[in-house]
Amino acid sequence: MTPNPADPGGGRTGGGAARDAGGRHMDKVVASAAQAVADIGDGASLAVGGFGLCGVPTALIGALFERGSGGLTVVSNNCGLDGRGLGQLLAAGRIVRAMGSYVGENKEFARQYLAGEIEVELMPQGTLAERLRAGGAGIPAFYTPAGVGTLVAEGGLPWRYAPDGSVAVPSPRKEVREFGGRSYVLEEAITTDFALVRAAKGDRHGNLVFHKAARNFNPLCAMAGRVTLAEVEELVEPGEIDPDAVHLPGVFVQRVVPLTPEQAADKPIEKRTTRPAPAADAPAGAEGEG
């Protein structure tokens, strides 16, 4: 995923989107998630939106799982939970390299990493976000203070372990420069072959609106993908979304997959936390005492 300065915006003129005689994008809706992922083959690189289980493109991931593609490089904040989201591909051994900022609660991810079965590049979360955004904007690299004075800049982070527990592939040393008396580390932008994202609303031209926290990494991943697939909970006609309400312009999206009501409603909670119901005879205000 080395950036290509000659390809600003990740080569977003491809992806098979239909055009009219004037070269303008037309209807980008595809019939199914399976059709949308049909050309994602072995060895592809993917930027995948979501944070935990929030805003995860589960229908597209499920279709990719059914397709059977393997040897995948995945860029995402985390790798899902055991059996959910990207965790489905991970458990099947389809992911060979993961780039993200959080291992999280996925026990299988930790097992594969420590056993040397998968290569993992961890980075500060803000750095991940900016590397994706820069890739979509055609910026090949940038300097950031995050990671200066640590193994992020100095190298040596274990990207891959050997079966005996030694470090088989360490992270490389990165360039550090001083600006205004402060040190900054050089980080390269990220672009990927495909991006999978989920939006609350989208129109046939690919303009997307995300709902609150589900926006997370979705717009950034969509920008970084050379071909971006968006599953939408609600499909509307062009012009129905106020231009000021658009979170991601359709220029970054090549395929739109409308979800069924059942798919749109499938939003599991990663950790449900509730307070105990107060006893019926408890005095007012007593439930918070003690």
Image (cartoon, helix red, strand yellow):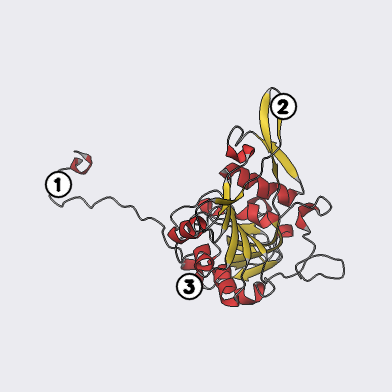
Return the x and y of residue 56 as percentages of the image width and height: 53, 61
174 shown above or below 190: above
Answer whether residue 258 is visible to the viewer in this image. Answer: yes
Return the x and y of residue 189 as percentages of the image width and height: 71, 48
Q: Nearer the viewer, residue 29 or 15?
A: 15
Where does the C terminus fall, quadrant-wise?
top left
Return the x and y of residue 67 as percentages of the image width and height: 60, 76
Residue placed furthest toward the top: 181
Callout 3–callout 1 Cβ contact below 8 Å: no
Q: Is residue 6 left or right of residue 157?
A: right
User: Which-is-in-front pick, marks 3 and 1?
Assistant: 3
Where does the N terminus fall, quadrant-wise?
bottom right
User: Which-is-in-front pick, marks 3 and 2?
Assistant: 2
Q: Is residue 25 left or right of residue 76?
A: right
Amino acid found under the numbered disc labelled 1:
Ala
Callout 3–callout 2 Cβ contact below 8 Å: no
238 shown above or below 4: below
Secondary structure at numbered mark 1: loop
**Residue topped by disc 1:** 282
Amino acid found under the numbered disc labelled 2:
Phe
Secondary structure at numbered mark 2: strand
**Residue topped by disc 3:** 262
Q: Which is more N-terminal, label 2 or label 3?
A: 2
**Residue topped by disc 2:** 179
Q: CA distance from mark 3 to mark 2?
A: 52 Å
Q: Which is more N-terminal, label 1 or label 3?
A: 3
Q: Which residue is found at the position 62% from the left and 46% from the top?
A: 171
Amino acid found under the numbered disc labelled 3:
Glu
Secondary structure at numbered mark 3: helix
Residue placed furthest toward the left: 281
> Badge 3 local density, few (<14 within 10 Å), some, or many (20+)?
few
